[in-house]
Image (cartoon, grey):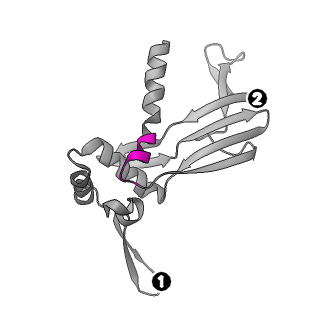
Amino acid sequence: MNLRNRIKYFIKDLEFLKAYSSPFKPLKLKFYCGKIALGTPYFYPRRWVKDSNKPGYLKAIPKKIGFDFVSLGWKTKYDDYRFEWSPMISFVFFKWQIAVTFVAPHLDHYWESWLYYTRETEGTTAERIAQCRKEAPQTWTSHHADGTKETIDYYNLILKDKWL
């Protein structure tokens, strides 16, 4: 892959930063410093090398020194957006890791709503939010052991006060 395409894909991976200028609450940064403990995204930081025992195959080995950028993890399932993992920047130095994770309030509800907002809506901000609330509702009801139930509209928890 040439440099121009790498830059293009890297910029696309930073798309989640638009959440800061959206009607959604700002992301918070979560810092980690310690022994390697965070996956990037599923496995600990690793790199792929040729397998000397199986020509034509690659094997994963732990990174000794390296940098990883993990973009927002999501997929579509049954035409709905599904959140998988938060964006993260990770630096590994031997068996130590420094990582910064971009954390949203109420992760699943936030990112699935934000993805719908950015990819499926048009118009003014107010029109787009109204479309999200109608077509991708985030109203959930929990039933408790004591027989009571609680209904929460997560848009009230993930949108900035100005847009409620």
Q: Which of these two is toward me, 156 or 96? A: 156
Q: Which of these two is toward me, 7 or 23? A: 23
Q: Is 138 above or below relative to 69?
A: below
Q: Name the residue rendered at 62%, 44% in the picture.
A: 100
Q: Name the residue rendered at 43%, 56% in the picture.
A: 25
Left or right, 153 with reference to 70: left
Q: Secondary structure at mark 2?
A: loop
Residue that extends furthest to the right in the rendered view of this protein: 94
Q: Position of residue 47 (x, y in %)?
A: 66, 26
Mark 2 lies on residue: 64
Q: Is 8 above or below relative to 91?
A: above
Would you say the magenta stretch is mainly helix, strand or loop?
Answer: helix
Q: Which amino acid, by three-letter code, is at mark 1? A: Ala
Q: Is 59 above or below relative to 114?
A: above
Mark 1 lies on residue: 145
Q: Could one spot residue 1 in this view of the protein?
A: no
Q: Name the residue rendered at 79%, 33% in the picture.
A: 94
Question: How many residues crowd around disc 2 within 10 Å: few (fewer than 14), some, or many (20 or more)?
Answer: few
Q: Which of the 4 quarters of the picture holds residue 56?
A: top right
3D distance between C-alphas at marks 1 and 2: 49 Å
Q: Are marks 1 and 2 in contact (CB under 8 Å)?
A: no
Left or right, 85 with reference to 51: left
Q: Which of these two is toward me, 116 or 127? A: 127
Q: Secondary structure at mark 1?
A: loop
Q: Position of residue 2 (x, y in %)?
A: 48, 12
Q: Which of the 4 quarters of the picture holds residue 139?
A: bottom left
Which quadrant is the C terminus positioned in?
Answer: bottom left
Q: Position of residue 78 (x, y in %)?
A: 30, 48
